[in-house]
Image: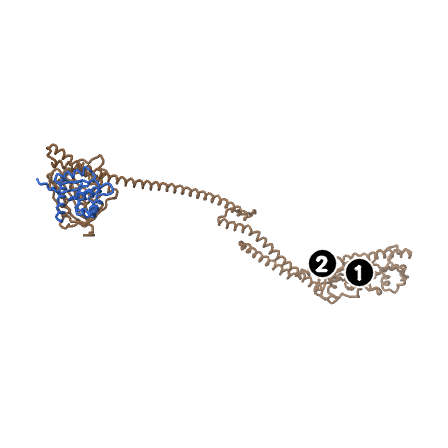
Amino acid sequence: MRFNRLSYQILVVFIAVIIVCLGVSGWYMLQISEDIVTQKISEGDQNFAGRIAQEIEAEMASVKPTLTLLAASTGLRLMEATEVKGEIDRVQSSFPEITSIYVADVEGEQIARTGAGELENVSMAFSFLMAREGHELVSDIYLEPTTSQPMQTITLPIIDNGTVVGVLSADISFSRIMVSVMDIYIGKNGNVVVVADNGMVVAHTRMKQVPELDMSNLPVVEAVLAGEEGTMKGYTDELGRQVLGSYMPIQELGWGVLIQRPLADIDAEVEQLRTTILWATIAGVFLGVLGGTLMARQITKPIGQLASASERVAQGDLSTPVDIKSSNEVGVLARSFNQMIVSLKKARGELQQWGEELERKVHERTAELEQRSQELADTNIHLEEMSRHKSQFLANMSHELRTPLNSIIGYTKLMLDGLEGDINEEQQKDLHTVYTNSKHLLELINSLLDLAKIEAGKIVLSYETFTISDLLAEVISTIEPLVREKGLTLTHSVAPDIDRLYADRAKTKQVLINILGNAVKFTGKGGIRLNIAESDSEFIFSVTDTGLGIKEEDLEAIFDSFKQVGPAQIAGYAGTGLGLAVSKQFIEMQGGRIWAESELGKGSTFTFTLPKKKMISL
Amino acid sequence: MEKPGAGKKILVVDDNDDSRRLVVKVLGLRGYEVIEAATGEDAINKAQTELPDLILMDIRLPGGIDGLEATRRIKALSQIAHIPILALTASVRPEDMQRALDAGCSGFARKPIDIDELPKQVAEYIARASSTD
């Protein structure tokens, strides 16, 4: 059980509230239980006493007026004795309480009496004497000697025109009352007592034979005979018990009804009530706990469902919505939650779709890229191969071109030198033209080969240490004949400290010869000067001529192999060939620079530098 | 007129007929007896049968045996190992030159041939070889 904390919390609070409430009320009930019991009992008893009083009153109250009416009736005075007897018999049979009636004359001689007894003379009886004097006499309650029944005698004068003409007397028995009272069950040990106006007990539940018992000294009896009704607690009753007494007067008779219960009985009842309260409290607590548990579960169940649902959602499971049909806040929450799940599902679906789409696109693009890349690589390989083929082709072609050219040059020279016989002047001129053009063509082919090799990356630098003077000697010996041929002068100067160089000797020589050769070629008259100087970091070679000069805009283009082979020939500098392009490559390969300065018509200066390198070998 | 090449035998090895004939002409005009070979194999055979005073060997030769290989084989045969061999090459690359020297060449003759220079070189190397004999 993972979501019980909330329900436990609710339950604990609920139980605490129940226990406190029931505890407090139970405790209070226990506190007032005695009062409650007492009040309940006394109220009930008083009520009951009232009912008994009413019954007795109803039964007894009609006796005396009936007798009074009988005494006052004219018939009784005028009737024969038998008739009187009939009359009083009738009355007696109508009223069971009346045990006997007699009618006597003023002499005390009984005229008639109920029953079968003999007529007596009652002239000596106190009641007769009082009645003869015109008084009504109601005797105290007394016990009939033979039966011990509580009795009362009512004696009335029979008056005719203001004169007492006779006496009527009736004995009234309370046995019926006593019997009915005796049958009343008041708790285990309670009793009902009916007391007459003189405090004598008329009826007593606990006594089959009513004792001659005067209870007038008991305060309850005093109170009830004074016409009061109420309850009195804690007095000692006629049987010596501590009791609770409830009393009610019988107003018409001046009597009282008393219901008494021993306090021990009441205490037992209080105890019983307390036990009931205790059990009721316990049952209440139990029911409360049970109800609380159910309620807590009822409240927390949907919350738990929501909690586990949200946990599932948190773990990415959107398949199960919350099943709560309630219309309260939790229900609203659940519905919102389900809507949220639906939205999430939708969003996740879209996201997944987007993701898949994205993945697919990335895949596609990657594939495309790979294909492109592969194509490029293939193209590259193809291009490289083509380039290699081109370079190889150029190298081969250069060789193939050179071989016949060499033959042309050689054979022309053979003829020019007249080794195979004399030739005339015109022939010599022509052959010379063939010879120089062939040489130029050879140069071009050689440069082409060099460029092809450079492009193919086949040119490697070959550094060595050499002396400037040796290099100069070789270069000059190559150029000198041309200079002489054109009637020019060639001078050179070398800065004093320059002795050895560490560079690619062959390439440096080729560059020098190329530049000097150009100078010779494009100088009509004047001189060519070669100057070798140095700075801190470089050797500086410069060749100055007094030739045609070059237009400023062409100064850079003459080093450009591609522009050189284009149709736009540089004015006046045509035929330089590819030598300068090759020279530029050779110099730059060695970390140097090459450039030209010129003034059109006055001459040019070509300069190149070589960085001073550490001489690694001799 | 006493020709400088009189009595001397030169073997010219070149696959290109025109080039070879030019050399033959240039040297023949100087009085040399010139024998020709167009392949490395032929060159080795001729060197053994003719016993020339000097061999002009084109480095680039077609077929299985190029100039360098032919030179190496000639130098490996004791009866002709002494014959000086000049390499005919257009290359100025030091490594190419070194390879030729390693194969057994005594020196170089530049291509394209200089008809003035070549006879001088030939004469010089023959003289040098005979002086060391």
The amino acid at mark 2 is Gly
Q: Which mark is residue A534?
A: none
Subunit bearing disc 1: A
A290 vs A560, left or right, is: right
- Circle 2 packing at 10 Å, graded few (<14), some (14-19), many (20+), is some
Q: Which mark is residue A179?
A: 1
Please name the color used to draw chain B: blue
Please name the color used to draw chain A: brown
Which residue does the image show at 54% across and 49% down from the upper left? A330
Q: Nearer the viewer, residue A239 or A129?
A: A239
Q: Nearer the viewer, residue A159 or A198?
A: A198
Image spot of residue A285 (x, y percent):
61, 57
Q: Is residue A23 visible?
A: yes
Q: Which mark is residue A44?
A: 2
Image spot of residue A539 (x, y percent):
17, 48
Question: SS at mark 1?
Answer: helix
The amino acid at mark 1 is Val
Q: Residue furthest bottom?
A: A240
Q: Residue furthest top?
A: A426
Q: How many numbered marks have been drawn onto this rendered protein structure?
A: 2
- Circle 1 packing at 10 Å, graded few (<14), some (14-19), many (20+), is some
Which residue does the image show at 56% across and 51% down from the upper left? A301
Q: Cα distance, mark 1 to mark 2? A: 22 Å
Q: Nearer the viewer, residue A324 or B73?
A: B73
